[in-house]
Amino acid sequence: MESTGGGMGISQRVKNVMLLLWVILLPLTLATGFSLYLAQQQILRQQQADASLLIAQAESISDEAWDMIDRLRPLERQSCDEIETMLQRYSAQYAYFRSIGMTASDLVTCSSAFGNENGSLQQMILGPLPEVNRAWWSLSVAGTWGVPNRPAVLFIRRGTQGYGAYALVEAQYLLDVMRAIHDQRGNHLSLRVDNGYRIETDDDMPAEPSWLAPRVWQQSSARFPIHVTITVPGASVADAWRQNFFTFLPVTLILTLLLAALANVFIKRKRAFADELRRAIAREEFYVHYQPLYDARHRRCYGVEALLRWRRRDGSEMAPDSFITLAEREGCIVSLTHHLLRLIVRDSQRWQLPDGFHLSINIAAAHLQDAQFVDDIQHVASQLSRHRLTIVLELTERSLIGDDALATAHLRQLRQAGIRVAIDDFGTGHCALSYLQRFPLDYLKIDRGFVHAIEDKGGETPILEAIIHLGHTLELQVVAEGVETAAQFHWLCHHQVRFIQGYFYARPMGSQALMDWLGLHAEQPAPGH
């Protein structure tokens, strides 16, 4: 709990330190996140460009292979002796091919590399064939019978009656492109045709920083079953991030200094207001006015609302809405409320009041949700106990926004001790209807804006009537504030509003003036009643 006489409280110092830390860390955090985002986008564009380049190369080789198979189709069913020389000549014209040849079912009947030495396709690719029913298919393999240690890509076309042709493409040309990309970027690349062997660069992935994972991009050809994967190690992502971060660092430092300067001005302004408030309290610049409340059923004054006022040393008055709003915004409202309670207790030493006289006190959200709130109110109640007052805590709708459970617990505990609760300025805040069900309330105070609408709209006020009906339905006592004319007063009485507050009945007044006024008017009906 802040002390009104001991300077800025420890909790406020902690808030100021947290604000400065936030000002320092926010630009750094933004720069870090934005730099990482840009690095990832740069790497993604590189991966997409490299994948497109590799796929384009693989598609070009595939086109050559399928064109070659089309040229071999007229050679189906011819003997190897008749076509062997032609196969060798075709194969020599294109550097891509490891071998080309003719097939019957799953047997190689003639090839450019081994002539009429028959063997199965499985023996040629050193593994099983894929289970496919297509006439045309392709597959990447780890090696072949003649070159077991280098990958290749097999292209097959099966014609009528099981005859067909094949082209075996050397994968070295693909590996050359992959290694060139790897040497330039440091990435790991792999290519697979259909569900075959994964052709990949033989580099070792570097150790990953613990805070960054590798970036993986997969892309497939739209024309052929060619699938490419490009993996960028986390170390490369970290390098790209560092480059971007140091590019943004000067701007980040300037932004940090600017925010720090603004935060310093903000803290000084808060401290200045807190200091001004403390000095005003020490100089007795604050005082309390009390506005009488009228009970239309019993035609008499039944209580008052305590209203804090501030008269500066130069004699000027600061509007309550202004300094209370400032106190809430600058974190001084609890200190100010403590002072209000002390002033009320001091004024009460000269009071002579009937038992059950109501005293309404406005409470702010910060105080309601403070851990010491219940103790504060109970302490004031004990100091006022000799007057046997009914204390009413007036809460605006914004006072109830926050920790519903804590606010509800505080209000229930105080109501058990005889303290009453009113919701003030009803209908002007947030979620007013839900508050009526969630919080323990006794009074509903209608905002002056709805009361003034009585004459503005010629008595046609469906919203005001709905509020009054709602209050009666929920068994809440309804209070109308801001009543200034006889027409408003009579309309409200006609609609069963029992409690009236406003200039029509009485203006706010000092403590001694209140005692004098009560001596003359407490048991008198309101004017025009």
Image (cartoon, rainbow, N blue to C red):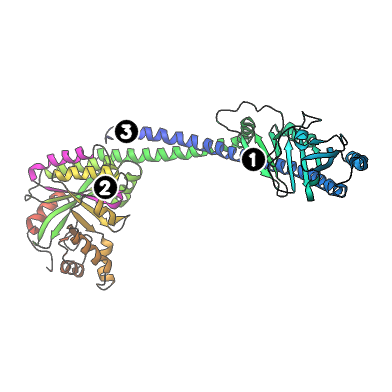
- x and y percentages locating residue 314 in the rendered image: 29, 46
Query: How far separated are the C-alphas under marks 1 and 2?
Result: 68 Å
Mark 3 or mark 2: which is in front?
A: 3
Q: Quadrant location of residue 122?
A: top right
Q: Amino acid at mark 1?
A: Trp
Label drawn at residue 217: 1
Q: Amino acid at mark 3?
A: Gly
Query: How far separated are the C-alphas under marks 3 and 1?
Result: 55 Å
Residue at numbered disc 2: 310
Q: Can the viewer see residue 259 in this picture? A: yes
Query: How far separated are the C-alphas under marks 3 and 2?
Result: 23 Å
Element at label 3: loop
- x and y percentages locating residue 159 in the rendered image: 79, 49
Labelled pair 3, 1 in contact (Cβ < 8 Å): no
Labelled pair 3, 2 in contact (Cβ < 8 Å): no
- Is residue 304 magenta-colored? no
Q: Amino acid at mark 2?
A: Trp
Q: Main secondary structure of the magenta part?
A: helix
Q: Left or right of 143: which side holds 231? A: left
Element at label 1: strand
Q: Quadrant location of residue 17?
A: top left
Q: Can the viewer see residue 501 in this picture? A: no
Residue at numbered disc 3: 9
Give the mark nearer the N terminus: 3 vs 1.
Answer: 3
Classify the position of the N terminus by image quarter.
top left
Element at label 2: strand
Q: Left or right of 182: which side holds 383? A: left
Q: Left or right of 23: which side holds 68? A: right
